[in-house]
Image: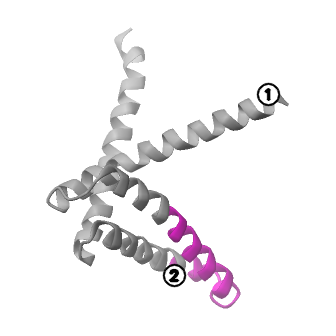
C-alpha cells in the first residue's frame, strides 16, 4: 500500500514539474508581447486551462461530426480547438486576438529552441569523445 501512495506522489510531482516546464515558454512569450503584464501564475493558468479547453473542443467536434465528415472532422476540430486556445490566451493575458496568436506562435518557437538545446546538450558527451 505504501508503494502505491509513493508511486502516486511521484506521478503527481512529475506532472507538476512538467506543467511548470510547459508554462515557461508561454510565460516568456506573454511577457514579451504584453508589455510585461504577464505573470508566471497567469501563464500556468493559461497552460492548464488551454490544454483542457483545446482537448474538450477537439474531442467534442470529433465525436459530433466524425461520422459525417470523417477525417475532415479531426482537421475542423483542431482548427476550432486552436481558436479556443487563442481565446484562453486572450482572456488570461487580456490581449487581442493577434497578440494571443503571437503568444501561441512565440511560445512554440521558444519551446522548440529549449527542446533543441536540451537535445544538443544530451548529445554533447557523445561528440566530445
Assign the magenta stretch its main secondary structure: helix
Please name the residue shown 42% across and 58% down the image.
45
Q: Is residue 85 left or right of residue 97?
A: right
Residue closer to the observer: 116 or 22: 22
- Residue 66, given in percent of the width and then of the height, sits at 66, 83
The image's mark for residue 112 is none
Callout in the foreground (1, 2): 1
Could you tell which of marks 1 and 2 lies nearer the N-terminus? Answer: 1
Is 62 drawn above or below residue 31 in the view shown? below
Q: Quadrant of residue 72?
A: bottom right
Magenta residue check for 53: yes
**SS class, disc 2:** helix
Residue under circle 1? 3
- Magenta part of the protein: which range? 51-76
- Residue 15, given in percent of the width and then of the height, sits at 57, 43
Is 78 drawn above or below residue 68 in the view shown? above
The image's mark for residue 76 is 2
Magenta residue check for 63: yes
Q: CA distance from mark 1 to mark 2?
A: 44 Å
Q: Is residue 37 left or right of residue 57?
A: left
Within 10 Å of disc 2 (Cα), the crowding (few <14, some 14-19, many 20+) is some
Residue closer to the observer: 63 or 22: 22
Residue closer to the observer: 51 or 61: 51
**SS class, disc 1:** helix
Amino acid at each position: 500500500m505504501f508503494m502505491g501512495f509513493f508511486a502516486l506522489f511521484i506521478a503527481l510531482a512529475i506532472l507538476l514539474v512538467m506543467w511548470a516546464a510547459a508554462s515557461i515558454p508561454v510565460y516568456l512569450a506573454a511577457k514579451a508581447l504584453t508589455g510585461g503584464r504577464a505573470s508566471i501564475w497567469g501563464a500556468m493558468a493559461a497552460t492548464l486551462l488551454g490544454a483542457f479547453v483545446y482537448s474538450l473542443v477537439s474531442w467534442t467536434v470529433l465525436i459530433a461530426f466524425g461520422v459525417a465528415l470523417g477525417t475532415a472532422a479531426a482537421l475542423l476540430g483542431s482548427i476550432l480547438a486552436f481558436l479556443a486556445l487563442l481565446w484562453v490566451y486572450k482572456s488570461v493575458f487580456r490581449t487581442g486576438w493577434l497578440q494571443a496568436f503571437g503568444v501561441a506562435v512565440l511560445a512554440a518557437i521558444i519551446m522548440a529552441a529549449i527542446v533543441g538545446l536540451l537535445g544538443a546538450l544530451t548529445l554533447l558527451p557523445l561528440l566530445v569523445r
